[in-house]
Image (cartoon, helix red, strand yellow):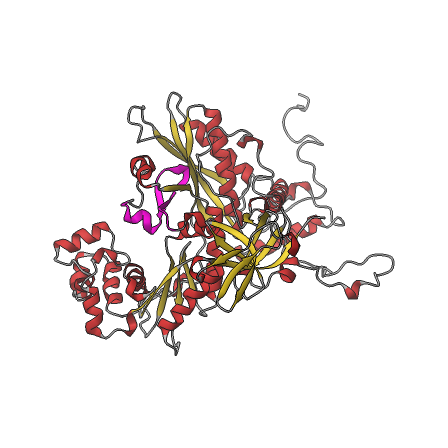
């Protein structure tokens, strides 16, 4: 009988390998480090890895590095002559606000303070930490409303002055009736 | 100092507990002087129950947690003003208050939105005067009234705060450490034991059966005797009342172990589609919180239920926990899991009143178990997507970008009939000053 064509090895069958493979035992404690090494080799394009040895990705970040990574990037061309002069940007919070916890923004409605440069729709920066003094512009609670006026306090007379002749001043018999809410430090307006 | 430091170190200590008076109402009053001197209540989410009451409302007999619909007659008669809760405002005002208080001590424990402990060990000064200075500054800078309790233990500081609040003769600051023993006992003998921190209704009832009715009774109880009836926590309370400081300040808030987001609906919801929108919205909010504390979650719980108050309705309540293949903080994946769970618990024919999600089994983002079946590159991309979403929403306002599944028109959204503007956090909602 002639030799059967069935069974046995067939040339070209099975998984393609670039080269023969072997199974290796390693200490369990070294597993992580060796897999990282394997992955690193796989990641670098110079070393081609046989497909059959595709390692499982176990962590996200490779910790093992063979090439020191530069902390700066090198670009072709001139370095910027301004590099040494880079400063932080202007921060309006820092410039305009003295007491962060005590500072509030309020929006103006009305026209009684146009003489002080405060117009309808402007925003006010109000600092409650500042002591209200004579002649400062303040926000006060009057008749259940927050009101912007100039604070007048002389010889026992307390008034809230309007900065528009068409509006009356508000006079107080005693300071008890009026609660100063805060002192206006800045006006923000659109132009 | 972390939670682990909450040991049984015994030593001479001094604590202050600073607590905002009727905090939510006070926040509202800062920006709305009309509310001054009038009975005001702040209602819980969905305008359900009173969660804060002004002194005037308390005097009228409005109880904490009372459902608003039961108060209608009283409200009309006395002109009680009811406001929807504005947690954005309260949180901002709380942050301001806590920042100011933090300057008064090297150690601070923010205990809740309106209370914090300060460590005053070794302060060689008149603590009552110090307390008055603190009160004045908080009132001046933020407009919020606070009361201060001082004592050699946290439990006594908390009790002192209660006394400062209830008894006007202390003008807002009560230092129990300063009182001679007999005066202190005299004071404690007139306070009901239920006012002690950690003594809830059940413990109070059990104590009453043992003949312990006042704070003084509890203070003078035998620790071993208490230990035979109650847990070690109550035993510790007794020792703290006796002036032995066992509870330390916890300055670092431990990362939350669960994150819950749930709301009652404004109207009863029957359709699955509406519930899906709600679940996606809540999941979005919960996932944002999760990422803010740099955690991942490994399981999500979804629940829905009908209203137990509408007794004529058929009742249904169900929840389901979905385990995730891998810990994640990705809104898309969490929403997917939530919807999967919802579909399994949803039954048609019920009028649903509430839905919610709970993120569970939280782990720090750093330790994360790898999985064989997860595509890591895709994972990294969605991580960037989440970061981008968060930063856009932070810059452009809540929900500037959101999952379309959360719906454009949210029919189920809760009632907030009388919510005040976000005076301090939204440029378009600033408080108005007339002139």
- Is residue B388 or residue B79 the one in the foreground? B79
Which residue is at the far right?
A: A77
x, y (%) of residue B135? 41, 64
Residue at screen point 40% across, 28% down: B345
The total number of labels drawn is 0
Give the magenta part as a residue range. B37-61
Residue at screen point 25% across, 60% down: B232
x, y (%) of residue A112? 60, 50
Whether A84 is drawn above or below B291: the answer is below
Whether B150 is drawn above or below B46: the answer is below
x, y (%) of residue B14? 35, 71
Residue at screen point 58% across, 55% down: A162
Whether residue A26 is visible, yes or no, is no
Quarter of the picture containing the N terminus of chain B is bottom left
- Report if residue B43 lies within the magenta region: yes
User: Residue B67 vs residue B392: left or right?
Assistant: left
User: Residue B226 vs residue A119: left or right?
Assistant: left
x, y (%) of residue B404? 58, 31
- Is residue A104 or residue B226 the one in the foreground? A104
User: Residue B97 vs residue B80: left or right?
Assistant: right
Whether residue B395 is visible, yes or no, is yes
- Is residue B414 or residue A165 the one in the foreground? A165
- Is residue B413 or residue A170 the one in the foreground? A170
Whether B144 is drawn above or below B153: the answer is above
Residue at screen point 40% across, 66% down: B118
- Report if residue B19 lies within the magenta region: no
């Amino acid at each position: 009988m002639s030799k059967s064509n069935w069974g046995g090895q067939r040339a070209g069958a099975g998984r393609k390998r670039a080269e023969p493979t072997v199974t290796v035992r390693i200490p369990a404690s070294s597993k992580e480090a060796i897999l990282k090494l394997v992955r690193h080799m796989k990641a670098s394009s110079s070393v081609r890895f046989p497909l059959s040895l595709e390692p499982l990705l176990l962590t996200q970040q490779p910790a093992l590095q063979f090439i020191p990574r530069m902390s700066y990037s090198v670009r072709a061309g001139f370095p910027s002559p301004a590099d040494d002069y880079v400063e932080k940007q202007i921060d309006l919070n820092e410039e305009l606000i003295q007491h962060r916890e005590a500072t509030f923004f309020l929006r103006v409605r009305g026209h009684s303070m146009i003489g002080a440069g405060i117009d309808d729709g402007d925003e006010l920066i109000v600092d409650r930490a500042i002591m209200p003094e004579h002649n400062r512009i303040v926000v006060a609670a009057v008749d259940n409303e927050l009101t912007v006026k100039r604070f007048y306090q002389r010889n026992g007379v307390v008034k809230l002055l309007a900065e528009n002749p068409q509006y009356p001043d508000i006079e107080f018999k005693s300071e008890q009736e009026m609660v100063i809410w805060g002192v206006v430090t800045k006006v923000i307006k659109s132009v | 100092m972390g939670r682990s430091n909450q040991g049984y170190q015994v030593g001479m200590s001094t604590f202050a507990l600073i607590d905002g008076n009727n905090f939510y109402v006070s926040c509202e009053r800062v920006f709305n002087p009309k509310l001054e001197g009038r009975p005001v209540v702040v209602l819980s989410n969905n305008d359900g129950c009173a969660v804060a009451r002004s002194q005037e409302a308390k005097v009228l007999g409005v109880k904490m947690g009372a459902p608003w619909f039961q108060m209608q007659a009283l409200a009309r008669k006395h002109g009680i003003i009811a406001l929807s809760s504005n947690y954005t405002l309260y949180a901002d005002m709380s942050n301001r208050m806590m920042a100011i208080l933090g300057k008064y001590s090297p150690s601070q424990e923010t205990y809740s939105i309106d209370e914090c402990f300060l460590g005053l060990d070794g302060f060689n000064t008149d603590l009552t005067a110090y307390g008055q200075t603190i009160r004045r500054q908080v009132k001046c800078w933020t407009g919020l009234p606070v009361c201060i309790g001082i004592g050699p233990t946290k439990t006594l500081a908390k009790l002192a705060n209660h006394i400062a609040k209830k008894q006007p003769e202390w003008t807002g600051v009560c230092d129990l450490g300063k009182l001679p023993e007999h005066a202190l006992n005299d004071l404690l003998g007139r306070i009901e034991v239920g006012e002690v921190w950690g003594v809830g209704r059940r413990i109070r009832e059990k104590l009453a059966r043992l003949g312990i009715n006042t704070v003084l009774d509890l203070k003078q109880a035998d620790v071993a005797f208490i230990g035979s009836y109650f847990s070690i926590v109550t035993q510790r309370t007794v020792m703290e009342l006796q002036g032995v400081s066992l509870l330390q300040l916890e300055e670092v808030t431990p990362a939350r172990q669960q994150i819950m987001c749930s709301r009652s609906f404004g109207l009863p919801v029957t359709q699955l589609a509406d519930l899906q929108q709600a679940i996606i919205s809540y999941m979005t909010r919960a996932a944002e919180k999760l990422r803010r504390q740099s955690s991942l979650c490994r399981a999500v719980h979804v629940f829905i239920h009908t209203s137990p108050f509408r007794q004529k309705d058929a009742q249904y309540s169900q929840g389901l926990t979905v385990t995730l293949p891998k810990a994640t903080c990705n809104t898309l994946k969490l929403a997917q899991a939530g919807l999967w769970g919802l579909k399994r618990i949803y039954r048609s024919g019920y009028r649903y009143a509430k839905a919610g999600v709970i993120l569970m089994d939280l782990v720090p983002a750093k330790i994360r178990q790898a999985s064989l079946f997860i595509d890591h590159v895709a994972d990294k991309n969605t991580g960037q997507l989440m970061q981008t979403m968060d930063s856009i929403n932070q810059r452009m306002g809540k929900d500037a970008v959101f999952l379309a599944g959360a719906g454009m028109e949210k029919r189920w959204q809760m009632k907030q009939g009388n919510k005040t503007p976000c005076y301090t956090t939204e440029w378009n909602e600033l408080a108005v000053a007339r002139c």
